[in-house]
Image (tube, rainbow, N blue to C red):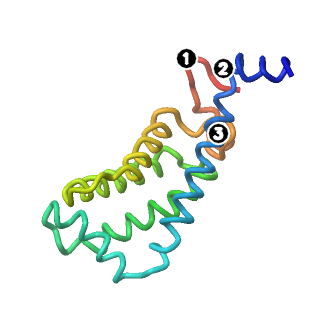
Amino acid sequence: MVKHLIFFISNYNKNEYSLLLLRVVFGLIMFINHGINKITAGMTKWDRLGSALTDLIGFQFLSSFFGFMASFSESIGALLIVFGLFTRSASVLLFTTMLVASINHLIDNEFPELAILYCILCLVLILSGPGKYSLDYMCFSKYYVRNNIKMK
């Protein structure tokens, strides 16, 4: 019992497992709850989603494009996060999508707690990267440097 307790108390060097858990759970929740429905819905849904941004910036002719990008980030981007492939790029797309969603909720006098939570999780992944247990690490490990020490 004490052996297991010491493992949890002194386990400061196992951040890679935390990043793996964060990526997989966050990405699957985003894909299942938000992404799959939007990417398969088609142009009408994309146009409505994109109008959330184009109403703010004024370019109505881009609403389908921005709607597709939001759907893409919540579906394909979420799967990329799960597998740890192009994690930072996918997280930037998803962060932008959730930031626009948060702004729209605030404009409607609603508190966007879930969108803000997703923004924070994306920000964590942008800053920390995907971790050792990712396809990014497997494919691009020679480019990974953490704390001025090349990861092995």
Q: Which residue is mark 1?
A: 148
Quadrant location, the C terminus: top right
Badge 3 density bin: few <14, some 14–19, many ≥20, Cα 10 Å: many
| Of pointers 2 and 3, the one earlier in the residue sequence | 2
Indicate the position of residue 102 as horizontal and vertical percent values.
Answer: 30, 53
- Label 1 is placed on what type of residue? Asn
Q: Residue at x 26, y 56 (%)?
A: 110
Q: Relative to 97, is 89 above or below?
A: above
Secondary structure under tag 2 reads loop
| Of pointers 3 and 1, the one earlier in the residue sequence | 3
Between the C-alphas of marks 3 and 1, the distance is 16 Å
Nearest the camera: 35 or 131?
A: 35
Q: Does residue 69 appear left or right of residue 47 in this picture?
A: right
Q: Does residue 137 appear left or right of residue 107 in this picture?
A: right
Which one is closest to the eye, mark 2 or mark 3?
2
Q: In the picture, residue 120 is in which quadrant?
A: top left
Are circles 1 and 2 on residues that touch, CB within 8 Å? no
Q: Which residue is mark 3?
A: 137
Q: Does residue 79 appear left or right of residue 94 in this picture?
A: right
Which one is closest to the eye, mark 1 or mark 2?
2
| Of pointers 1 and 2, the one earlier in the residue sequence | 2
Q: In the picture, residue 132 is in which quadrant?
A: top right
Q: Which mark is residue 58?
A: none
Q: Does residue 78 appear left or right of residue 139 in this picture?
A: left
Q: Which residue is mark 2?
A: 12
Between the C-alphas of marks 1 and 2, the distance is 19 Å
Q: Residue at x 61, y 50 (%)?
A: 25
Q: Relative to 102, is 19 above or below?
A: above
Q: Residue at x 38, y 64 (%)?
A: 70
Between the C-alphas of marks 2 and 3, the distance is 21 Å
- Label 2 is placed on what type of residue? Tyr
